Amino acid sequence: MKIVIIGGTGLIGSKVVPCLHAHGHEAVPASPDTGVNTITGEGLAQALAGAAVVVDVSNSPSFEDAAVLTFFETSTKNLHAAEAAAGVGHHVALSIVGCDRAPESGYLRAKVAQETLIRSSPIPYSIVRATQFFEFFKRIADEATDGNTVRVPPVLFQPMAAADVANVVCEVAMGAPLNGIVEVGGPQQFRFDEFLRLGLAVRHDARDVVADPHARYFGAELDERSLVPGAGARLGTTRFADWLSRTAAPAVPA
């Protein structure tokens, strides 16, 4: 069947596309790079013609509170209109574990708004809520850095590899609509500060990681379980240490 992947050239989408191809489906990556823009509507009707499933793994180009809310609301509304016109029977969206537990974060509020629109649409849906990606650990550290110090709350943290996220999204897209949410996380739980300390050490980054219970994560103060999935979550198989070793920069010859 034809499955259109919105954000299909990005971190997750570029992994979902070959996964769907490997299972015999016509996987069509759609993004501004391929002439499809969910904000303006450009190319949407043509891309969705004949599609049975739409997978939305797109992301806002700006994390500013108002901009990110506008992106997810506008994009989702335009997608739903185009899906209804094309007769799409399954809308799959990637969201974030704990997005409804951190209302101080403008980005997470925007993801909740996106989920609300999806649930209120007549189009059958599945929402995949994933924990944070290993690939974002440096960005997370940079956001929490002041001088040479990284301050993060010592809460539970259960990140996962982007490839494992993509595998679950692929599986859900090939199945019947859940009309609900499935959570996915990594195979290990860390303390947030422990996770960053380990990653920065392997990357030979000398920044000092400090556990600060009141440090904010993208604007939100977290509690112990804000960022970890609940019981019954699907777990990836890639361990952080293995991912670090595979993605380490090659040594520079002397």
Image (cartoon, rainbow, N blue to C red):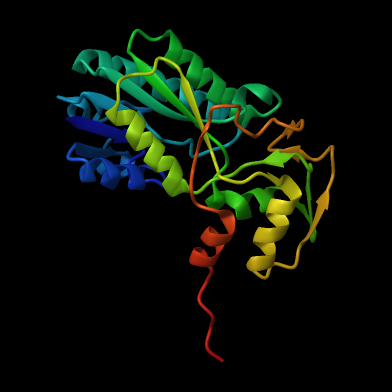
Can you give x and y, in whole percent of width and height, for residue 169 in the image? 38, 35
Q: In which quarter of the image is the C terminus?
A: bottom right
Give the quarter of the image for residue 67.
top right
Q: Quadrant of residue 54 in the image?
A: top left
**Residue found 43% across the figure and 16% down from its top:** 118
Q: In this view, does 84 lie to the left or right of 245?
A: left
* Quarter the N terminus occupies: top left
**Residue lying at 22% horizontally and 14% vertically, measured from the top left:** 85
Furthest-front residue in this view: 232
Q: Outermost residue toward the bottom?
A: 254
Which residue is pictured at 33% across the width and 17% down the height?
80
Residue 26 percent across, percent down from the top left: 17, 37
Residue 114, placed above or below residue 194? above
In the figure, 142 relative to 109: above or below? below
Q: Where is residue 104 in the image (x, y as percent from the top left)?
A: 71, 26
Q: In this view, does 106 lie to the left or right of 146?
A: left
In which quarter of the view is residue 222 placed? top right
Q: How many labels does the image show?
A: 0
Give the vertical position of 242 relative to 80 (above or below).
below
In this view, 41 is above or below 201: above
Q: Where is residue 92 in the image (x, y as percent from the top left)?
A: 37, 26
- Is residue 107 or residue 159 the one in the foreground? 159
